[in-house]
Amino acid sequence: MKTLSRWISEFCSKHPNLGIPDLIKYIAVGNVIVFVGDMVTQGMLSQFVSFYPELILRGQIWRLITFVFAPLPVGGESMLSQTIFGRTFLFALMTFFYYWIGTSLERQWGSTRFTVFYGLGVLFNIAAGMILYLSFPFRATGALLGYYVETANMYYVNMSLFFSFATLYPDMQVNLYGIIPLKVKWLALIDLVFFGYAIVSPLMSGQWLWALMPIVAILNYLIFFWEDLINTLGYKRAQVRHRTSAQTINFKKAQKELRERRGYLHKCAVCGVTDQDDPNMEFRYCSKCNGYYCYCANHINNHSHVQ
């Protein structure tokens, strides 16, 4: 039976031109415009574009799209966030970080798959936000609830982006706040703890509706990565069984000899970059090409299949 993940992969492969190239760039630019506009209008621009269910039901349907441009609060109650310079610095840092993640995912997946992932996450959270609003017993607090829903929406959409990035590039190192070097997988594990708390805490207190936001973000992630996670678990179990087998030892020996003879192990069939030129570059082999063709991360989803 074909899974949803496989169906999405086939759809994106058959419709490579349906995506929005550089989508995350437009999102980041929109965030910058609204952030600067808020500084001039004392937050009025965010109020105009944010996700307020009560106002959407009154006909302000543009909010179903424009809320993705509303900047998230940064810094919490920290001293740095109390000044204009501090808020601007934290906003710029966060915006650049998610822009970098988005462009990396788009290079890896292609524009269509990235657009579908981001768009599906937004749609899931719009649905969850409307369910929260319609289920809330006090409609008079709709504006306050709308603000919570709006911030939660984009926070969890961005977090699903980060989990996707951490799955594809677990060992990549980033500098937390531009200073502290950490591997992406450790940051993802820390965020996973907060995710778990955001789900478990409402369930334990009987307010299960508030767990919808993190749940739908995890759902979006699982739709795209379920098969990869299952295959990874199966691969690791097989790796434990065969790590010391004669075949494994011979394969590693053959790889070592090949690297010594050619000077590299992997070489992109499009641009010619090798693992010797860029040790951090990931290489994959295309199952749709007729033959054993290797491609770098920049071209695995951006090449003409050899038939």
Image (spheres, rainbow, N blue to C red):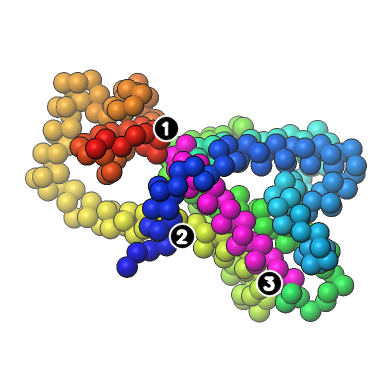
**Of the image marks 3 and 1, the number of the one nearer the N terminus:** 3
Q: Residue at x 74, y 50 (%)?
A: 66
Q: Secondary structure at mark 2?
A: helix
Question: Does 280 sit left or right of 184 as displayed?
Answer: left
Mark 2–mark 3 CB contact (< 8 Å): no
Region rendered in magenta:
107-133
Name the image quarter holding the C terminus: top left
| Residue 116 among magenta residues | yes
Q: Say the numbered circle drawn on residue 298.
A: 1
Residue 108 in view here: yes
Place of residue 32 in the rendered image (x, y in percent of width and height, measured from the top left): 74, 37
Q: Is residue 43 left or right of residue 269?
A: right
Amino acid type assigned to the residue bearing label 1 in the image:
Asn
Q: Amino acid at mark 2?
A: Ile
Q: Which residue is mark 2?
A: 223
Splitting the image into 4 quarters, where does residue 203 fall? bottom right
Q: Quadrant of residue 198?
A: bottom right
Proximity of marks 3 and 1: CB atoms separated by less than 8 Å = no
Q: Are marks 2 and 1 in contact (CB under 8 Å)?
A: no
Tell me: residue 99, above or below residue 6.
above
For label 3, the residue is 131
In the foreground, 177 or 221 = 221
Residue closest to the eye, 61 or 134? 61
